[in-house]
Each structure stands twice: as structure tokens, then as C-alpha cells.
Image (cartoon, rainbow, N blue to C red):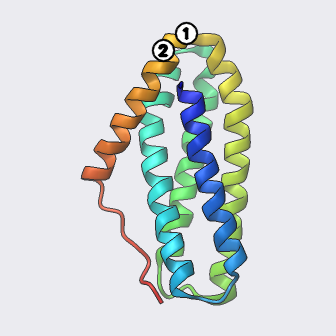
Amino acid sequence: MSIFTYLKEDHREIQSLLEKIEQLGPESSAERDETFNQLKSKIILHSKAEERAFYNPLKESKRTKDEVEHGTEEHQEAETLLKELTDSSLVGSAWFQKFKTLKQALEHHIDEEETEIFSDAKKVMSDGEASQMEKDMKAAKKDEEQHRNIKDRDVA
């Protein structure tokens, strides 16, 4: 496997959780809140590990520097939305509208990353580097999981 396959697998898991939450609808429920907490954890661990193992090395290349800086900004935007969605005072249709904003932002980010960033990254790295990045990302994700305290949304 390589970093590209690994990231795509993570992206599919995130998209699946987004779809599940959307299908559950705007009414608060324990299932929706638990699924949101899974999504939040998955996104934060993914983005922090991705920035360390994939984006940081790509910042060294002129071809990919601007793209990964833009990707990092999109990660920050998603984290801001996740924080807002964690607030238990945000409920009902207001929560769901903010969730739809998050979903749209993540879908845009994933599409952009899998087309533009992946394409250019493949031009500036070897297969061996891509394979090593996958290992580095798995290690970074484990490290993030052990050391990062992710606040859950209170379950309804």
C-alpha cells in the first residue's frame, strides 16, 4: 500500500460517517451524537497525522507547497466547524445546517486532495517515499490518538 491508498481509505470512512449522519436527519438522537463523535475523532486524528506525515514533506517542493498550505487551511476550517458542532447548545435545524456546511467543506477538500494534491505529489515523490509516508502517517495517527484529548458532544 502507499500513502495515497491509505488516505483514500480514510476518506471513504469519513464520507460514510457523513452520509450516516445526514440520513439520521436534523433531530437530535443518541445515535447521531455518537456517530458525530466518531466522525470528529476520525477527522482530527486524520488531519493532524496527515499534516505531519504527508503535508510537511510536500511543503519542501515548489510544485506542492501552495496546495498543502491550502489543504492545511481547509483542515483548520473543518476543525472550527467541528468545535461549533460539539457545543450542546447548538441543536435541531441550526445544528444540521452547520453539519451540512461541514459535509460540503469536507467533500470539497477530499475531492481537491485526491485529484490535485495526489497528482502533483506523485510527480515529486518516489514509490518508496509514498510507502514510507503511509507508515509515518499510521505512526503519527497512533501518537495523536494517545496524546490528543478530543472533546465529545454530549450524547442526547
Q: Amino acid at mark 1?
A: Ser
- Name which residue lies at 47% across and 70% down: 37
- Name which residue lies at 59% across and 88% down: 28
Q: Residue furthest front?
A: 1
Q: How many marks?
A: 2
Find residue 8 and report its horizontal and vertical position in percent: 62, 39
- Residue linked to disc 1: 126
Is the residue under label 2 in contact with that under label 1 (CB below 8 Å)? yes
- Residue linked to disc 2: 129
> Marks 1 and 2, Cα distance to the nearest angstrom?
5 Å
Question: Would residue 49 be visible to someone looking at this image?
Answer: yes
Vertical arrangement, residue 131 with respect to residue 44, above or below? above
Question: Element under label 2?
Answer: helix
Find residue 44 and report its horizontal and vertical position in percent: 45, 53
Question: Element under label 1?
Answer: loop
- Name which residue lies at 73% across and 42% down: 111
Q: Nearer the viewer, residue 13 or 105?
A: 13
Q: Residue furthest left?
A: 147
The residue carrying pointer 1 sits among few (fewer than 14), some (14 to 19) or many (20 or more) residues within 10 Å by Cα, namely few
Vertical arrangement, residue 53 with respect to residue 151, above or below? above
Q: Is residue 111 left or right of residue 4?
A: right
- Name which residue lies at 56% across and 12% down: 125
Instruction: Give the number of the disc on residue 137.
Output: none
Vertical arrangement, residue 117 with respect to residue 94, above or below? above
Vertical arrangement, residue 126 with respect to residue 1, above or below? above
Q: Is residue 115 left or right of residue 130?
A: right
Q: Nearer the viewer, residue 67 or 16?
A: 16
Q: Amino acid at mark 2?
A: Glu
Question: Would residue 84 be visible to someone looking at this image?
Answer: no
